[in-house]
Amino acid sequence: MPLFGKSQKTPAELVRSLKEAINALETGGDRKAEKAQEDVSKNLVSIKNMLYGSSDSEPPADYVVAQLSQELYNSNLLLLLIQNLHRIDFEGKKHVALIFNNVLRRQIGTRSPTVEYICTKPEILFTLMAGYEDAHPEIALNSGTMLRECARYEALAKIMLHSDEFFKFFRYVEVSTFDIASDAFSTFKELLTRHKLLCAEFLEANYDRFFTQHYQRLLNSENYVTRRQSLKLLGELLLDRHNFTVMTRYISEPENLKLMMNMLKEKSRNIQFEAFHVFKVFVANPNKPKPILDILLRNQSKLVDFLTNFHTDRSEDEQFNDEKAYLIKQIKELKPLPEA
């Protein structure tokens, strides 16, 4: 009995057939494109079933997945699919993401062959990142699904973080379409928090470019959701022990303290609350630089009054009330530095 059944194509035939259909989709006229679209859809379903199994077939054997993966690498089809994602129909886009993520997770012992392959073809990652561009909004969410799967692997996250393309996320998280901006922010956050040491090294090496040139703009955004999400993420980054060096530098800069004090007075209670979690790091620092101490001393009595009446309805939030009481005590006890 044949290995793949009478009517079933082999992995090599499927990949070749899909590649031909994609090329026809790229170059064909209307009628040709319609036929190519059908062929693309049909072949994507067959490849998806080969990887996941279907209702009337068993899950695939390892050697079938291995053959299929190797054909995908050899044919450069993963990149071709991503480059043409906007040409593929709605269901097909979802199938591309399912196929990509399945092949990405594939392991041989401790090795991840697809991760190794993508490391040699970083254009795959950069093309996915460009999926958030305005040109083809219909591919953004599928691109995001694949990107977050890639971000789980440190080697791929490193390529993305250390590329100029990463800094385009500061634009993507502010696009006017809410779903796309939110998805871009999820990917942005994943890249900055998943691999702690990698992220700490990146933030230290790119401190000025990241915080001064770009992040400050998000915190001052006119978009409420962007401001709130950015402030919350900033708090998480500063309070992560791996980012101690970055945190120390951030809380030594007077402009950052002034921004947080202004955000404590924002109309939005959610933004006030997130600002509180960043502000507390400035106050709790036992080695405050003189410019920081001077600002706190100048506003000492105002800050004590303000914090005493700050979010008093959160009576059941024990941690918040403990932190607030601690900050009030710290501010009350502030003394100028002795004269040198």
Image: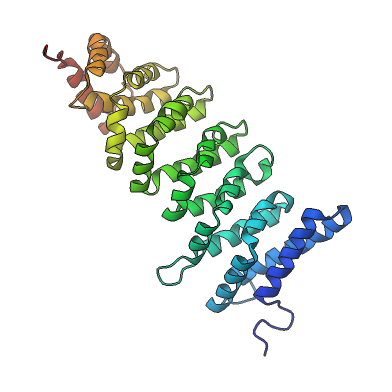
Out of 67 and 75, give the one closest to the viewer: 75
Out of 284 and 162, give the one closest to the viewer: 162
6 is higher (above) or lower (below) than 164: below
From the viewer's perspective, is 72 left or right of 161? right
59 is higher (above) or lower (below) than 26: below
162 is higher (above) or lower (below) than 269: below
Q: Please identify the quadrant where the N terminus is shown.
A: bottom right
Quarter of the image where one finds residue 241:
top left
Residue 120 image offset from top left, x and y in percent = 52, 59
From the viewer's perspective, is 223 left or right of 291? right
Tell me the residue at 25%/24% (across/down): 324
Q: Please identify the quadrant where the C terminus is shown.
A: top left
Tell me the residue at 62%/34% (across/down): 177
Which colouring convention does the figure follow? rainbow
Quarter of the image where one finds residue 76:
bottom right
Residue 210 image offset from top left, x and y in percent = 43, 33
Residue 293 image offset from top left, x and y in percent = 22, 17
Out of 68 and 74, give the one closest to the viewer: 74
From the viewer's perspective, is 289 left or right of 64? left
